[in-house]
Image: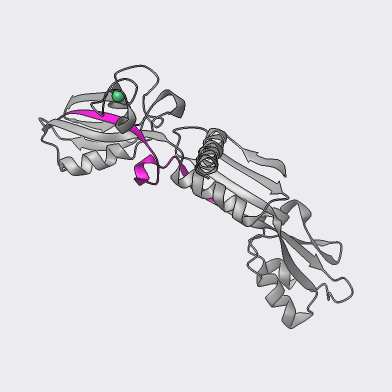
Amino acid sequence: MKIEPRDISENSMRFVISNTTPAFMNMIRRALVADVPKLAIDDVIIYDNTSGLFDEIIAHKLGLLPIPTVPEEFVEKAKCTCNGEGCSKCTVRYTLSKEGPCTIYSGDLTPDRPGFAFSEKRVPIVKLLPGQRLIIEAIAAIGTGSKHAKWQASCGVGYKYYPSVKIDATKCDNHGGCIKECPQGIFKFDGKKVVVDQSKIEKCTLCMSCQEYCAVASGAIDVKWDESKIIFNVETDGSMSAAEALRQSAKSLRQKFTEFESLL
Ligand SMILES: [Zn+2]
């Protein structure tokens, strides 16, 4: 197996992995979506809410805010020594008390210890008119995407087979219709010859538009793909880096295999 990084930023990652199988990469994809633990607001205590939004809508919005998470620092509430009562090992508490006129943003919630402010500070929660009040306490707990989407750290996880597009020079009429036909712009003129722009080949979505167009004209284009070489994309919501989410997915798979082996 060989991994070649492409675009890597804090919250997103694209890489090409060779000598693998679609089944293996799909296992990673599923683990990223369902098994990576992260913090999310799980319980909201509303002391006063005279805003224009129902309690449930505010609680729902709070649940979807990304909280910076180091999964190893927390245990699931149900498995904690506090028996699910909520302690510093399994929960983070946030407080908010505001009176209008103002707009409440995610950054207005104060965590009970440093380092747990929401990753996005400018997500609007509710707008308060003069005299309206919102006083709440919110409790975050750790969970996984398999239980609820609010605990899904990764979004936009996907992969595609590595494309291979070839032009048979003996058949090609160099008319260039395929250049307009390809939505990803992977063909170009090299002098008067139509060629594949190899620097853009990874953009190919295997839509086959070029091959279908060319089949009528000259039949020179041949589109294939390599199932042992995969282009993989992952993004996170900001609760952890894309690299950390990948490490966590590998860790969850390792735990599952270890458990399976011991059961056998
Ligand atoms: Zn606890």
Q: Where are the magenta residues, as a range?
A: 132-157
Q: Is residue 70 visible?
A: no
Compared to residue 259, the image places residue 116 above or below, namely above
Quick check: is 141 in the magenta stretch? Answer: yes
Quadrant location of residue 48?
top left
Q: Nearer the viewer, residue 159 or 23?
A: 23
- Residue at (52% x, 39% y) in the render: 262
Q: Is residue 247 visible?
A: yes
Quadrant location of residue 114?
top left
Quadrant location of residue 176?
bottom right
**Tag count in the figure?**
0
Quick check: is 138 in the magenta stretch? Answer: yes
Quadrant of the rendering where the N terminus is positioned: top right
Name the quadrant where ligand 1 sits: top left
Residue at the extreme right: 170
- Residue at (86% x, 77% y) in the render: 171
Compared to residue 59, the image places residue 228 above or below, namely below
Residue at the extreme bottom: 216
- Residue at (61% x, 49% y) in the render: 232
Q: Is residue 250 left or right of residue 132?
A: right
Q: Position of residue 254 (x, y in %)?
A: 55, 38
Q: Nearer the viewer, residue 179 or 260?
A: 260
Q: Position of residue 47 (x, y in %)?
A: 12, 29
Q: Is residue 123 left or right of residue 228?
A: left
Q: Position of residue 261 (x, y in %)?
A: 55, 42
Q: Is residue 78 left or right of residue 180?
A: left
Q: Nearer the viewer, residue 136 or 189?
A: 136
Q: Is residue 47 left or right of residue 33?
A: left
